[in-house]
Amino acid sequence: MENLIHPAHMLLSELDGFSVEIDVSRERADIVLNRPPFNVISMEQRDQLRLVFESLDHNSDVRVIVLRAEGEHFSSGGDIKGFLEASPEHVSQLAWNVAAPARCSKPVIVANRGYCFGVGFEISLACDFRIASDTVQYALPEQKLGQIPGSGGSARLQKMVGITRTKDVVMRSRRISGAQAYDWGVVTECVSDDELEKATDALVDELRKFSPLAQRTAKKLLNETEDASLTTAIDLEGHCYSRLRSSNDFREGVEAFHSKRSAKFNGT
């Protein structure tokens, strides 16, 4: 068994351009982009971010994951030179890596401020909740390089805002503010820059009050029925509802409601 080797062991030996902080007392993990001043995301970093999300998904001490950045900018995007150097096989994995927050069964919050361009925007779109500072500027500027978004950005954005607005953003490399993104339904909340951390903390604490099992079920159901017909979505919702009825968390929730006390969920 000691001869078994997996590339992930080496890949995570030294994190490239970000750090991970776990606060067990608050059941929270923070993935912090930290390559100042613009937090450019390298090709290797994308692989590492995927593996870290997968690791945190299996960490029983973590209920909620926060993706944030040091400094005044979330991320100006990817390492442009890295695209020319990367192999076709590596490039083909870009969308899979960036989709890691969506695949993660736990709630993922992203806190955005300043530049949020390219892959910075794409990975934010893959999160469940986007809290935006009023300083944020979102963009998919790949047209300026003779390219298109390659990590799911145009596809996710189109699902949220429709084809007309997506063409406006993608084909014109147009920037949108946090306020406009909120009006379009892209972000969950837009706050003043000095309130970004406070708003993120409040959402973490709110999500921790719910049943982990019900949260995982809701996320999986909503993700998997996004492209489904209404009939199929309602049918799947009913199956999920039925399964949760036999859970300890549902029993605890009902008993707490009738006892007029706060429920204490354990995720079973």
Image (cartoon, rainbow, N blue to C red):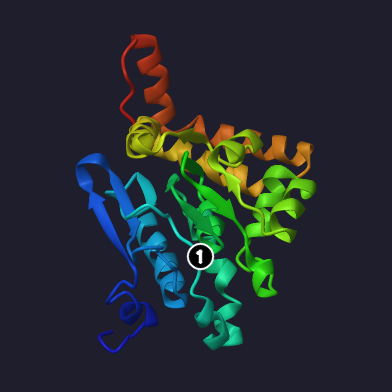
Q: Is residue 110 above or below residue 189?
A: below
Q: Is residue 28 above or below residue 123?
A: above
Q: Visible in this render: residue 226?
A: no
Q: Which amino acid does label 1 sit on?
A: Gly
Q: Relative to 107, is 29 on the left or the right? A: left
Q: In this view, does 141 lie above or below 71?
A: below
Residue depicted at 30% across the width and 45% down the height: 28
Q: How many marks?
A: 1
Q: Residue 113: percent from the left, percent from the top?
A: 43, 47
Asked which secondary structure carries label 1, the reply is loop
Residue depicted at 70% across the width and 43% down the height: 161
Residue nearest the observer in this picture, 144 or 106 = 144
Q: Residue 133: percent from the left, percent from the top?
A: 44, 40
Q: Relative to 259, is 86 on the left or the right? A: right
Q: Residue 7: percent from the left, percent from the top?
A: 38, 82
Residue nearest the observer in this picture, 225 or 167 = 167
